[in-house]
Amino acid sequence: MSLVLKNGTYINYSTLEFVKKDVVVYEDRQALAFYDYGTYTPEVGDVVADCSGKYIMHSFADAYMRPGLSLAANAKVFTKKESTYFRYVSDVLWNIDKFIDKDLVYASALYAAINAARSGTTFAICRNESSKFIEGSLAVTAKAFAEVGISTLQSYAACEAGGYAQAEKAVRENTDYIASNQGLMGIAASYLASRELFETVAKTCREKNIGVLINAAEDEIDQINTMRDQRRTVILRLYESGLMDYKSTVLTNANYISDDERSYIKNKPAWITHNPIGNFRRAVKPFNSIWLDDNIMFGSDFSGASMPENMSHAYFEAINKDNEISLKTAFQRLNAVHRYTQINGFDGDGENNLIVFENNSPFELDSNNLIKHLIYNRNISDIKLVIAKGKIIAKNGHATLIDEKQALKFISEQAQRIKC
């Protein structure tokens, strides 16, 4: 049994080639089959979707999502004068953490997954963190995403804000999870990790031949405290530890880095995830991508924004700045996560992950204006089908593999517990 997308226009995101085809989407393998427009005869058991007048393209992937914060919408709102990274950490993150337990982790992950599916995201690199519920939290998060139909690459952010014993629990949670699942090791941030913790994580990375996901110089406080405690910058510390030697390592943010640090990054296979809307909401310094074009991806962080929204924000934010980027570069970064998953052999982001969308703008789409359309005109309601591993996981803005109404009721009940 396969999913058949009849009479659509397929867009190759790598070449921007538009072709009118019937597309057969397989569940049992990450592949597509193309037939001349309108000619394919479905087999018994096939699910057929009429895509006349619609476009078919690879779905989106999120290079940095924090599902545990997806229910933070009612958290404290700061004035412009108050809005700082530290206030965000102390008044939002630490307060939400007081209420974290298994049910809240599951509800938060479920809400993040539903929002992702609605907006066309079918793969997410996730970071978990809590001082209250550590053991088993990655499995709970992965379960919620899998129920919606979204594949994940999980990591747990080891942090010594609550002492080394807490960080040890996080490291064990990572190693236990990756024993039977794809995942990354995790460190919350350099300034929250001692030399001992760095060495422990680096040792595990060497043993498992996997990288680490770490928040790298998101705010100046990371650089200041790392210099105070370690006598080196954040990126130099990562460079010396060997944690940047892995092609699966993800450095998130990298807003406050020097030119010397850029050269360290450029000479290593590690990736940077830029989280434009999350950064904007925390009032941290905008990301400057100068010299770092090759391995940059986009993430949503805690924002819940769609991946095209993050691409659009990054493009406009960079205008008339040192890191001004072209439309083409913005689109390449939107899709860079697909290259990341392919290079590292991670499952769940194959060719059988697709979106089917309409063009509700007055302009006919072609290879010359698709990127402009995604940045200027695209609306989430344009997506009619979201397909993951050959299955339809969202249709007309609603998740299809779960009882969405019941799921949202449960999520709402759990959200009432958060008092910030």
Image (cartoon, helix red, strand yellow):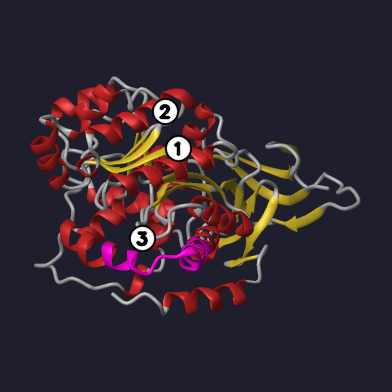
What residue is drawn where x is 48% and y is 38%?
Answer: 175
Circle 3/circle 2 CB separation < 8 Å: no
Looking at the image, is mark 1 or mark 2 nearer the viewer? 2
Q: Which residue is more in the foreground, 184 or 372?
A: 184
Of the two numbered discs 1 and 2 on the same chain, state the one appearing first in sequence.
1
Is residue 294 one of those drawn in magenta? no
Q: Residues within 10 Å of mark 2 (few under 14, many from 20)?
A: many
SS for dot 1: loop
Q: Distance between the Cα atoms at labels 3 and 1?
A: 22 Å
Q: Residue 271 location, x and y as percent?
A: 36, 32
Q: Mark 3 or 2 closer to N-term?
A: 2
The residue that appears at 66% across and 66% down in the rendered structure is: 402
In the visual, does 314 lie left or right of 304?
Answer: left
The reply to whether the C-beta atoms of the residues labelled 3 and 1 are less than 8 Å apart is no
For label 1, the residue is 184
User: Which one is closest to the eye, mark 3 or mark 2?
Assistant: 2
What amino acid does circle 1 point to?
Leu
Name the residue furthest right: 44
Q: Residue at x 30, y 56 (%)?
A: 277
Residue carrying label 2? 205
Residue pointed to by mark 3:
303
| Disc 3 to disc 2, C-alpha distance | 29 Å
Q: Magenta region: which residues?
A: 94-110
